[in-house]
Image (spheres, coloured by chain):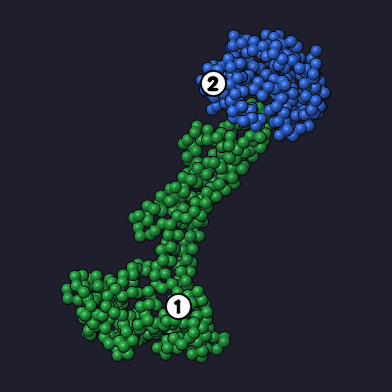
Amino acid sequence: MIKPAEIITLSFQTFRSHRMRSFLTMLGIIIGVSTVIAILSLIDGLNRSVASQINSLGSNTITVAKFTYGMGRADFEQLQRRKDLTMEDAEALKKLKSVRLVAPTLANNHITWLYYRQNKVNDVEVIGCTPEFFEVNNYSIVSGRPISADDVSRRRMVCVVGDYIVENLFPNESPIGKELKIRGRSLKIIGILDKKGSFFGQSLDNNIDVPITAIRKLFPRPQGFGRLFNSLTIGVLPKDPKKTDITMDDIRELLRRRRGLTLDQPDDFGLNTSEMLMTLFQNLTRVGFIAIVGIAGMSLIVGGIGIMNIMLVSVAERTREIGIRKAVGASNQNILLQFLIESVVLALIGGIIGIAIGILLAFLISAISPLKAGVALWMIMLGFGFSAAVGIFFGIYPARKASTLNPIEALRYE
Amino acid sequence: MAVICRAVDLYKTYWRGKVAVQALDGVSLEIVKNDYIAVMGPSGSGKSTLMHILGCLDAPTKGEYYLDDQLVSQMSDDSLAKIRNRYIGFVFQNFSLLPRLNALDNISLPLIYAGVGRKERLEKSKAILEKVGLADRMNHRPNELSGGECQRVAVGRALVTDPKIIFADEPTGNLDSKTGMEIMTMFDQLVNEGHTIVIVTHDLTVGKRAKKMIKIMDGKVAI
């Protein structure tokens, strides 16, 4: 039997004598595979960077809030009627056995412009918090001290500020002990947070953290539509990070009891984890992913048809060659394999070029944009597998046609 | 003498649309080892069809054909391919070389399908190339060779598997008379060395070089 290696050598001979045509044939595959690889690696890179960002928020933290992440089309009227989460709820959560730390916060209070002498900073969030806030949210203090229990109970007008504010308002001096003016009232800076970066383009360092008991001195209880955001958001750190589920069940049970929900009523509060946030995000990217794979799949089909077309031309052109080969002893199977391997090799070369261009493209995009590319082995295997499959699928018909040619007629063909 | 080919009452019918063409009409013959036969007849007489069947490129509609005592008239395509590869060598009028392969690779083509390893293939093909006097043309492609040289490569390709029988279909038809005679001299020599050769031709000067002549008329052997 003729060895496959011989046939592969043979197909390379064919490509060498038809360089331009072979390249044009491969173009469809090249475009398809390179698009898939580039998009996949960008999506993968995006998912990874989001995962690491979400982890920076505090990976095991359970966030108890009035609403759930990605609630979708909920009944607005019903949402408005939901009970706020209160300090009493937070105190009750602290007593749960599976809970290590509880950090109630009052967020969603924004200042558009904050000034200190001639410096100013845009978009600052003021968060009312307790001492547990810093550990639960992965913040560390680089200088000064955090909000203490004493600050909370005495409703002191003190604050801890994020790196972004320090950079912009106090470029050349230590902010510790300085006073910020917010809505006509003075806030004394007692501590500075370490830089944390951004999350989805939103800075995590633009916050001013004040005792939760002091925030209503600055921002009065919201009215009207804003009432929706009057509720506490409570960060909970489970005792055993591996048993987040148990802690969530305990929290759910406790809150349902406190709110007097009957068995047939759904939860009227939200339990959120970073994992859910991740899932939410992955669902978003999956849609794009499926769309892209669909489009790329089409271009692979077009590429495959191109291969089939050229192989058919090639079979017609080489009818005499097929006749000669058969006359000297090539079996139908030999001829079938020769043409099939030719189309597979053609598709695979296209695939390899496509993979290379795709990776290059992904890194090029990540070099000029904030997106990060992450190339994984499975993508390369996928590109390889896809192009081989296209080569076989679209090569089988021309190859069969070649193999069943009658040797006498093929020899007579001019 | 050992019988190589034995044809018993061969019929071959072609269909041209709805019209049946009787290309072979009951042909029986025997070819023994070291025969040097010219099959002659006008065009359309069925001599090419006979050669195709004897050369296992085609199967008869009716009748039995034995090659080396094997009944090949009923064999499958792939079995016939094997038979052609092992027992038969072909030389065609238009040389039928692969244009992209050089002389050496053209000669070694049948050995690829015989599953002969690369090294042995090269050795055998080089020896054959020397035998047909083209050792210095090894790396030339058919379009770089003269007609006579091409036909010598073709003869080399027919010889390389050491076949039981060689069929030559109008081997001098595309050559001038001088080079044609050179090829014929080569055939004479091969027969002297013990080869068995069947030449299909309508050229009497070629036919006369053979030791036996079989005339075909209207699909029948004419005495």
Q: Quadrant of the C terminus of chain A?
A: top right
- Judged from the image, the secondary structure of the residue bearing numbered disc 1 is strand
Q: Colour of chain B?
A: blue
Residue B32 is drawn in which quadrant? top right
| The label number, if any, that marks residue A6 in the structure image | none
Chain whose colour in the figure is green? A
The percent position of residue B28, horizontal first and vertical second, equals: 81, 20
Residue type beneath disc 2: Met
Tell me what residue is drawn at x 33 percent, y 74 percent.
A140
Residue at 59 percent of width and 19 percent of height: B129
Inspect the image, locate mark 1, and give the three-letter code of the amino acid beneath it: Ile
Rendered view: A133 above or below A365: below
Say yes or no: labels 1 and 2 on the same chain.
no
Task: Please state if A343 lies on the left or on the right of A42 as rendered.
Answer: right
Residue drawn at (66%, 24%), measured in percent from left and top? B161
Separation of disc 1 and disc 2 at Cα? 80 Å
Residue at which label 1 appears: A62
Res A322 quadrant in image:
top right
Please give the residue where the numbered disc 2 appears in the rendered image. Answer: B138
Res. A67 visible in picture: no
Q: Quadrant of the N terminus of chain A?
A: top right
Q: Name the quadrant containing residue B119.
A: top right
Mark 2 lies on a secondary structure that is loop
The crowd level at tag 1 (other Cα within 10 Å; few <14, some 14-19, many 20+) is many
Q: Counting other residues with Cα less than 10 Å from the Cα at mark 2, is it few (<14), some (14-19), or many (20 or more)?
A: some
Residue at left offset 77%, top offset 29%: B72
